[in-house]
Image (spheres, helix red, strand yellow):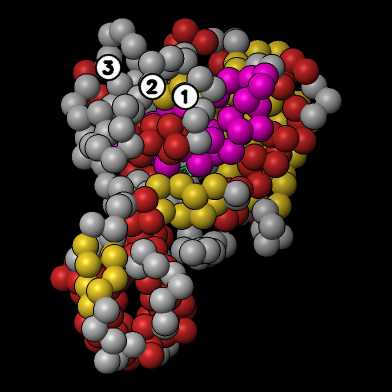
Amino acid sequence: MKLSLTYAFGVSNFTVFVKPPLFRNLHHSVCLSLKPTPPPPAAAAPLKHRMPLFLRPPTYTAPMSELHKWHEWAKSLASSVGTTFEDLDNGPDSSLLCRELKWLVEDVVEDQTLPSLTQSEKCERNVGVRVSLEELYKLWKERIEDRRPFQYIVGCEHWRDLVLCVQDGVLIPRPETERIVDLVGDVVLDNEELREGLWVDLGTGSGAIAIGVGMMLKSWGRVIATDLSPLALSVAAFNVQRYDLQDVVELRQGSWFEPLKDLEGKVAGIISNPPYIPSENISGLQAEVRRHEPRIALDGGVHGMDDLLHLCKGAASVLKSGGFFAFETNGEKQCKHLVEYMETAAGDSFCNLNIVPDFAGIQRFVTGFRK
Ligand SMILES: C[S@@+](CC[C@H](N)C(=O)[O-])C[C@H]1O[C@@H](n2cnc3c(N)ncnc32)[C@H](O)[C@@H]1O
């Protein structure tokens, strides 16, 4: 299954190394243990983690004919949408929903060599499936009637060369954010101090950026990934474990720089995709985002700049001299505002400020160095 959905955000569209394995068994609930001693109180409670469909064992069986019946029903529901969602809020049209249905079947049915579901009306052969038929009906109803994001239905998102687990309550990583990892790649290429340094991903969500950077730096540097949300951190921990990066990526819970008090002036690089949607724009987002993705991951205050400005101030004290930062924004206006702020209000802390476009050509990132 390959997904490349962008739930556009309005106009243009996150400690020290946890050595003990965070999970003994990936198929059990995740028990979040962020710092070896003592664990932060808010993170001590076990959080229920949902396994992505494609990682579940095929513990159910269903006759092909019944799967066929479900598939026909699901297809007709998808077809009935036409361009209604697209016209309403730039949501998915029927053809995208039909593609999602195909991906759902790929994730759910064990034997992919079986005859196509569309030709299996009379076939009584039983097939292994990863969820019950009843659950399949429920999931597809949620997709169409509640506009629940497809990535929450299947429990994962393809991002760069990774397949990241996601679930309700945790932001689905967006394709535009992938570029941040390349920006880090560019600066570490000929800078040993940065390559071997300590990096921080503030507001890590599913762990996407921290894992992308961790894969790149694994023989050299280290990454600390923070988030305010314990649920996001439990999902990030699962993803870190899946990519065997427990010795590279450390997770810390808390608000922005609060969990980094021990690292003032020691950090080689800060990367962050913080919430940056102006509050009043949230109600105009497509239903998948507005209704289902966590507001804490989206809402950047009146102008969408609250967290970005906070990150600038903190970066000045946490970064070491020569340290690099890359922040994602909503677009050109926020980029310019941030650069102006750094050149004026943030004193004389930064140099080589740059605005960098995303793959779609939208001015998306502000990068620079600590003097
Ligand atoms: C836009 S999402 C980005 C998630 C992830 N980095 C990505 O790109 O997919 C913003 C993240 O910031 C986290 N967040 C919001 N407020 C925060 C705060 N005060 N301190 C730390 N993290 C925060 C949210 O929980 C969310 O995971």
Quick one: label 1 or label 2, which is nearer the N terminus?
Answer: 2
Position above or below: 115 against 271: below
Relative side of 139 to 190, left or right: left
Callout 1 touching callout 2 (CB < 8 Å) = yes
Residue 22 is drawn in which quadrant? top left
Residue 40 got which mark? 3
Numbered-mark total: 3
Q: Position of residue 337 (x, y in %)?
A: 61, 43
Is 183 magenta? The answer is no
Dot 2: element: loop
Q: Residue at x 54, y 22 (%)?
A: 248
Quick one: label 2 or label 3, which is nearer the N terminus?
Answer: 2
Dot 1: element: loop
Give the foreground label among 2 and 3: 2
**Start and end of the magenta stretch?**
202-231
Q: Position of residue 210 (x, y in %)?
A: 53, 33
Relative side of 5 to 339, left or right: left
Quick one: label 1 or label 3, which is nearer the N terminus?
Answer: 3
Type of the residue with mark 3? Pro
Packing grade of label 3 (10 A; few <14, some 14-19, many >=20) is: some
Image quadrant of ligand 1 equals: top left
Residue 21 got which mark? 2
Residue 246 got which mark? 1
Taking the image as drawn, is residue 133 in sight? yes
Type of the residue with mark 1? Gln
Q: Residue at x 30, y 21 (%)?
A: 33
Dot 3: element: loop
Is 223 magenta? The answer is yes
Q: Position of residue 47 (x, y in %)?
A: 22, 35
